[in-house]
Image: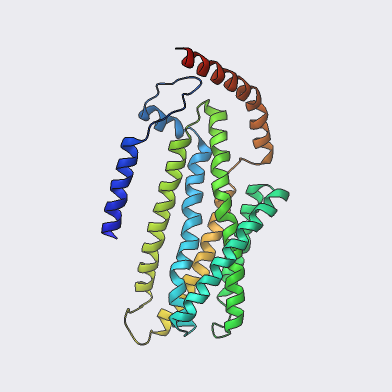
């Protein structure tokens, strides 16, 4: 991992040093990074979607990290079965990505995001009561859970763009680079926190790595990590969704207000490009 990290760091530094912008903006600006960082915080919806990203990734990653433990110690099956089990979940996610498009064609993204997380919370908590030795039932439930999980996981990337539109509409500045970087940063924080929570909670419930058999408390803790704890996370995520106000009506208002601005932008861009070519 250290070798790969060093290689990645070198490639990123090389990319930063050698990439050049080739498209000139219609209206050149000279804002510095400090002002852009201050301006992006004026977008109240951006601050809320950072929290949404954090909560959304924590719930799914905790369950994914607990999957191998659940198959091994709760279901009592081999790692070969775990490979098939996880692969089936990936297929479910692929189907979930397709369903996201179908659902958002009919209902707005925020509504789909909210109700999908409510369904995930109920489904995840209900999973705790499924007999782990009823293999076929567990497999079907896990597949359906992954189908549901992928729907909001895809939609939060689309909501980022809506939040950027809102920020430009509210402040008059579009700071997409910093906005998306902040979202990715909080997403990675969520992954780190979720990974740490899994390790901490396994230790709390008495899990012993390398042991031939785990205590009943440790097995129950693994079941909670796989079911109820992510379920609570999904419920919290649904509550955070309610804090966002970039609904269909507001997005339509923003698009209508932007229409003449976009037309002027294209005119300025064409003019600037012609002047630049002549110069």
Please give the name of the residue rendered at 55% of the width and 15% of the height, measured from the top-left corner: 271
Q: Position of residue 77 (x, y in %)?
A: 47, 84
Residue 144, image quadrant: bottom right
The answer, for residue 121, to whether it is visible in the render is no
The answer, for residue 147, to whether it is visible in the render is yes
The extreme bottom residue here reads 212
Please give the name of the residue rendered at 53% of the width and 36% of the height, measured from the top-left corner: 164
Q: Is residue 52 left or right of residue 100?
A: left
Q: Nearer the viewer, residue 16 or 104?
A: 16
Q: Position of residue 131 (x, y in %)?
A: 57, 83
Please give the name of the residue rendered at 33% of the width and 36% of the height, measured from the top-left corner: 18
Count of marks placed on residues = 0
Q: Is residue 69 above or below residue 266?
A: below
Q: Is residue 124 left or right of residue 73?
A: right
Q: Nearer the viewer, residue 11 or 235?
A: 11
Viewport quadrant of the N terminus:
bottom left
Q: Is residue 26 above or below residue 222?
A: above
| Color style of the picture | rainbow
Q: Position of residue 46 (x, y in %)?
A: 50, 40
Q: Is residue 58 left or right of residue 128?
A: left
Q: Position of residue 239 (x, y in %)?
A: 57, 53
Q: Nearer the viewer, residue 170 or 69?
A: 69
The extreme front residue here reads 278
Residue 135, image quadrant: bottom right
Please give the name of the residue rendered at 59% of the width and 67% of the height, measured from the top-left corner: 145
Viewport quadrant of the C terminus:
top left
Residue 162, image quadrant: top right
């Amino acid at each position: 991992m250290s070798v790969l990290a060093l290689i990645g760091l070198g490639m990123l530094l090389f990319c930063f040093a050698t990439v050049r912008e080739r498209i000139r903006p219609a209206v050149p600006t000279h804002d510095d990074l400090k002002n852009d960082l201050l301006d992006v915080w004026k977008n109240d919806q951006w601050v809320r979607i950072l929290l949404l990203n954090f909560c959304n990734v924590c719930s799914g990653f905790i369950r994914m990290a607990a999957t191998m433990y659940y198959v091994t110690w709760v279901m009592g099956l081999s790692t070969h079965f775990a490979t098939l089990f996880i692969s089936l979940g990936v297929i479910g996610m692929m189907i979930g990505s397709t369903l996201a498009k179908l659902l958002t064609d009919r209902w707005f993204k925020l509504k789909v995001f909210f109700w999908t997380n409510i369904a995930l919370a109920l489904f995840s908590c209900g999973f705790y009561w499924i007999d782990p030795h009823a293999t076929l039932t567990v497999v079907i439930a896990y597949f359906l859970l992954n189908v549901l999980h992928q729907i909001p996981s895809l939609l939060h990337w689309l909501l980022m763009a809506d939040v950027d539109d809102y920020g430009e509409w509210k402040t008059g500045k579009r700071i997409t680079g910093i906005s998306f970087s902040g979202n990715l940063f909080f997403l990675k924080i969520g992954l780190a926190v979720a990974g740490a929570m899994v390790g901490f909670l396994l230790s709390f419930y008495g899990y012993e790595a390398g042991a031939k058999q785990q205590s009943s408390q440790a097995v129950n803790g693994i079941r909670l990590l796989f079911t109820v704890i992510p379920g609570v996370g999904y419920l919290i995520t649904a509550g955070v969704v309610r804090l966002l106000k970039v609904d269909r009506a507001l997005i339509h208002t923003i698009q209508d207000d932007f229409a003449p601005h976009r037309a002027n932008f294209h005119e300025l861009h064409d003019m600037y490009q012609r002047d630049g070519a002549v110069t």
